[in-house]
Amino acid sequence: MTFISPPPMSPLPTTLRWDAGTLYLLDQTRLPLETVMEPQATVEQVWDSIKQLKVRGAPAIGIAGAYGLVVGLQGQTHRDRADFLQELDRLVAYLDSARPTAVNLRWALTRMTRVAQGLTAANPAEILAALEQAAIAIHDEDRQLCRAIGEHGLPLIQPGMGVLTHCNAGSLATAELGTALAPLYLAHQQGRAFRVYADETRPLLQGARLTSWELQQSGLDVTLICDSMAAHLMSQGLIDLVIVGTDRVAANGDVANKIGTLSVAIAAQYFGIPFYVACPYSTIDFATATGNAIVIEERDEAEVTHFGDRRTAPLGIPVRNPAFDVTPHALVTGLITDRGLLRPPYADSLRQHYAQV
Ligand code: MRU
């Protein structure tokens, strides 16, 4: 195998920006052809951006939700305190309804609610100012979580490896380095030469449009494949390691991630290839005992019946479009977290590392 020797890494794309009280989101539905930062004027626009996947990826939608709450409350400080807090509760429930599977959205909104509840003597303007700082803190913290995940996963990335990833758990899905892609970025910065294989990720092509784009932009050696090619590449000895992100980790270590992840995990086990899942603590949901309890988002059937604007399936055909699947913990070799590389049994290792969360 020949590898592209690593050039210096160019800056990663900015997914979210908070600037003088305005939220800007990189419209990921337009990638890779256009990079447009879209200002979010209303909370309804933020909800729609999350729903339409203009902003997507578990940590990024948590951050967007936190800022979205601030956007929604910006014109509401004339209300009395009780009214203002009632409006806050309404907006939290509204934003949380945008997407059900990634727990980071609820996690961020719960953290924001606690900040408001803790300010027992504050007026609405003071609460709003504290919420803005809390959203900025969630955003900043995610940068650090990604870096910590990268450092804990770095020893897994060895020169000459082929590494498969599914969907996009990179810079575009987070505040900076990503989760699954963070160890790859750090290994690349250290001059290790390896090849990434990106599954295209039907139906919305996050692998083709986003992962291959951001890795290519940063000078990593990345090759795009269709989802159905992954097992074949494994059989050819081209894949040494799989790393994916996740939208929710249940207390027993079952992981929800983009549809198709389960097939990759089953194939990896068949071929004896380690299968790792990267996540920050904000994605771990101790309130969900097993993956069976995770709500799987069902999306519009047009995502399956069409390629872009072109219909590719017969009219009237019944369609299913679950956006995520659950990989049982038994198929997961390790969880690369911000607090270390966790090994099975995950019910124990998750509790040990996150006892106080
Ligand atoms: O539907 P999406 O694009 O939001 O799905 C994203 C994923 O499944 C990611 O792998 C997951 O959110 C982890 S992002 C660090």
Image (cartoon, rainbow, N blue to C red):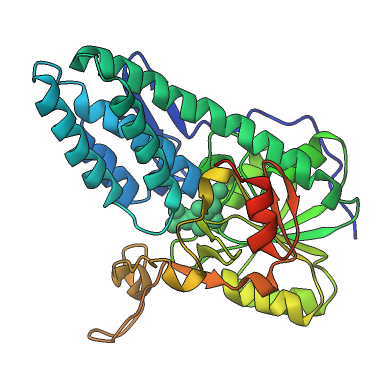
Question: Position of 165 compared to 72: left or right?
Answer: right
Tell me if I can see residue 13 in this picture: no
Picture quadrant of residue 270: bottom right
The answer to whether residue 337 shows anywhere in this view is yes
Residue in the image at 26% along x and 46% along y: 48
Taking the image as shown, residue 83 lies to the left or right of residue 323, namely: left
Q: Residue at x 33, y 69 (%)?
A: 298
Task: Look at the picture and state if 114 lies above or below 4.
Answer: above
Q: Is residue 138 left or right of residue 85?
A: right
* Quadrant (top left/top right/bottom left/bottom right) for the C terminus: top right
In front: 241, or 88?
88
Residue 323, image x and y in percent? 42, 66
Q: Nearer the viewer, residue 307 or 228?
A: 228
Name the residue: 87% across, 42% down: 5
Q: Can you say whether 152 is above or below 70 in the image?
A: below
Q: Residue at x 29, y 48 (%)?
A: 96
Q: How many marks?
A: 0
Q: Quadrant of the N terminus?
A: bottom right
Q: Is residue 241 above or below residue 278?
A: below
- Between 174 and 131, the one lying in front of the other is 131
Question: 179 or 218, which is in the foreground?
Answer: 179
Could you say where residue 90 lies in the image, as x and y percent from the top left?
Answer: 17, 40
* Res. 74 image quadrant: top left
Quadrant of the rendered image containing residue 310: bottom left
Counting from the top left corner in percent of width and height, residue 287 is at: 45, 57
